[in-house]
Amino acid sequence: MGVASIDNGASAIPVTVNMALARLKHEQAARKVAEQFAESKNRELSIALKAQEQLLRGGVKLMTDILATARPEVFQKAAKVQRWTRQISRHMTIDKAWELDLAALLYPMGVISLPDDLAAKYAADIALDEEEALRIEESALVASRLIANIPRMDGVARAVFYARKGYDGSGWPIDGPSGNELPQAARILKVLIDLADAATGASRTRDDAFRKLAQSHARYDPEIFAVARTVLMVIEPTPSEGMVSIRPMLARTGDVLVKDLTDQDGRLLLSAGTELTELSAHRLLSLAQSHALPASILVLRNTKSSNVSEDLPSEELF
C-alpha cells in the first residue's frame, strides 16, 4: 500500500490511501450539504419573490378598482392613455414597458382626493381656473405616494410624480429636472395625458388635440411627440368581424365600445373605444337592470382580457 506524508512543520505524518479516500468522502459530503443549503435558500427566495409579485398584482388591482368605482370618467381617460402607450411602445425602445403601462393607468389616482365638482370638470375637460389647474397637477403627488406603498413600484411612482412636468421645465413640480433628465415614462405620459385631455369632448378630434399641443410644443419631448403623432393619427380600419350588437347585461371583460354609451338623461357613461374591465362590465349589468341603458349596444368582442395585473411580466419585475 502506498504511503505519502504531510509535513506540518514539525514532523512528517504518514498518509495512507484510506486516509486520502476518507478525506475525499468528507469533502464530498460537505459539498453536498452546501449545495442542499443553497438549493433551500433558492427555494425560499423564489417563494418570497412570488409573494411579492402577488402583492404587487393585488395592489394594482385594488387601486384600479377604487379608481374605476370612485371616478369612472377619469378611469376611462386613463384607460385610453394606457391603450395609446401600448400603441406607441411598439415604435420606441422603452426602458421598462411594464412600469409605463401601469403608470398610464394609475396616474389619475390623486384625483380621488379632489372635490367631486372639480374631478367632474377635469374629466369633461371643462376650462379650469389657475387654482383648479394647479390642484389637478398637484394630485400627482398624492398618486405617486399611494403607488409607492406597493413593493417594486418606485419607478411607476416616479413616472406618475413627473407626468405633469413639461419637457421645458414648465408645469408641476415647479422645480426639479427637465428635458431628458425627466424619466422617459413621464415624458411619454406628458404627451398622452395632455392629448387625452385635449381630445375629450364630442366635437373634438384627435387631429384638433395634436394641433392644440403643437402650439405649446416646448412642453413635450420632440421625439416622443413625433412618434405619438405618427402612430396615433393613423386611422385604423374598423373590423366588421367581431363587431356584435348585444344587450348591455351581456357585456364581457375585453369588449370594446364602438359608440359612446349614455344613460336615458344623455349623460356620458362610457366613451367610444373603452375596453371593458371586469368592474365596468358589472356596472353595465347593474345599470341595465335599472333600465338606465338602451336595449342594445355595439361592441367589438376581443378574445384577450385587458386585466392589467395579467400583463405584468415577472421576468422584468424580478
Image (tube, rainbow, N blue to C red):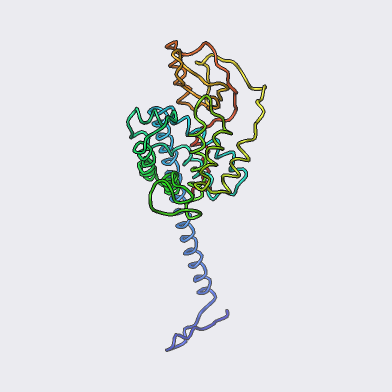
Name the image quarter holding the N terminus: bottom right
Q: How many circles with numbers are drawn on the protein? A: 0
Task: From this view, report whether residue 82 is shown above or below residue 203.
Answer: below
Q: Nearer the viewer, residue 59 or 112?
A: 112
Extreme residue in the bottom direction: 10
Residue 303 relative to residue 285: left or right: right
Rendering coords of residue 103 (x, y %): 46, 42
Seen at 60% across and 47% down, the residue is 92
Seen at 65% across and 25% down, the residue is 238
Extreme residue in the front direction: 215
Residue 127 relative to residue 195: left or right: left
Residue 42 relative to residue 118: left or right: right
Task: From this view, report whether residue 242 is shown above or below residue 166.
Answer: above
Seen at 51% across and 48% down, the residue is 218
Q: Nearer the viewer, residue 204 or 266?
A: 204
Rendering coords of residue 33 (x, y %): 46, 60
Where residue 136 sits, quadrant-wise, is top left
Task: From this view, report whether residue 298 is shown above or below residue 20.
Answer: above
Rendering coords of residue 194 (x, y %): 49, 38
